[in-house]
Amino acid sequence: MDKLVKTHELFDCEISYLKPLFAAYQYPWEMLPHIKEHILSLIESGLEGFTLLKEGVLVGREVKIHESAVIEGPVIIGHGTEIRPSAYLRGAVITGSGCVLGNSCEYKNCILLDGVQTPHYNYVGDSILGNRAHMGAGAVCSNLKSDGKDVVIHAEPPIPTALRKVGGILADGADIGCGSVVNPGTVVGKRTSVYPLTALRGVYPPDCIVKATDHVVERKER
């Protein structure tokens, strides 16, 4: 199951300003401590087609930002991304193109690849969301264990992260149902869908349907 949590197994990153970061680390959570410095280096060097909105905030073409959104740098927002009313970006946030950062959602120290949809009342902290990943209304990525200890990825064998905060690792095309909780260090494989109100914990393989925490079925071909 170790291969189910490796960066290249979970994500197909073709974003020029993120490819070096994704290529540098075997496991995706290893990127989390380096997101801020990566953003700062990109802001310092500049990105073609991007504009400095304010200090520490670089935005691409055709980005829509509602006037009630709060953005604290450093942040990079990809082309065509929409930031809806009362969204709160707490810094160290970087997105690809065509993302939706929804109303009353909160983001910190996270990466969203192209086409990510987090439209309503979501929390995304210390997390990585792959291309076209989707979180239903009220779904959250919990990033801190109740005992405050370092997060362990419950693969086979378990993998210590040496990090106190790790949220959700959602691979390309992962779809999290409304009201679900992605517990710290949970990995959801490519194209796997999760029923609403599910408490996720551990590693879920690709191309599956998660009907409950411990009830996973293989997706049938249509």
Image (cartoon, rainbow, N blue to C red):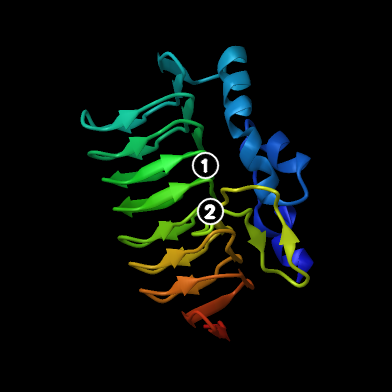
Numbered disc 2: secondary structure? loop
The residue sitting at 47% across, 28% down in the picture is 75
Q: Is residue 219 left or right of residue 84?
A: right
Pick whichever of labels 1 and 2 is earlier in the sequence.
1
Q: CA distance from mark 1 to mark 2?
A: 9 Å
Q: Which residue is mark 1?
A: 110
Residues 222 and 115: in front is 115
Image quadrant assignment for residue 155:
bottom right
Image quadrant assignment for residue 140:
bottom left
Residues 54 and 221: in front is 54
Pointers 1 and 2 in contact (CB under 8 A)? yes
Vertical arrangement, residue 139 with respect to residue 1, above or below: above
Q: Which residue is mark 2?
A: 167
The residue sitting at 51% across, 45% down in the picture is 114
Q: What amino acid does circle 2 point to?
A: Gly
Q: What amino acid does circle 1 point to?
A: Cys
Numbered disc 1: secondary structure? strand
x and y, in percent, of residue 136 in the image:
35, 62
Q: Nearer the viewer, mark 1 or mark 2?
A: 2
x and y, in percent, of residue 170 in the image:
55, 58
- Tell me if I can see residue 98 in this picture: no
Vertical arrangement, residue 9 with respect to residue 124, above or below: below
x and y, in percent, of residue 62 in the image:
37, 29
- Tell me if I can see residue 124 in this picture: yes
The residue sitting at 41% across, 42% down in the picture is 107
Q: Residues within 10 Å of mark 1 (few under 14, many from 20)?
A: many
Vertical arrangement, residue 168 with respect to residue 57, above or below: below
x and y, in percent, of residue 216 in the image:
55, 83
Q: Residues within 10 Å of mark 2 (few under 14, many from 20)?
A: many
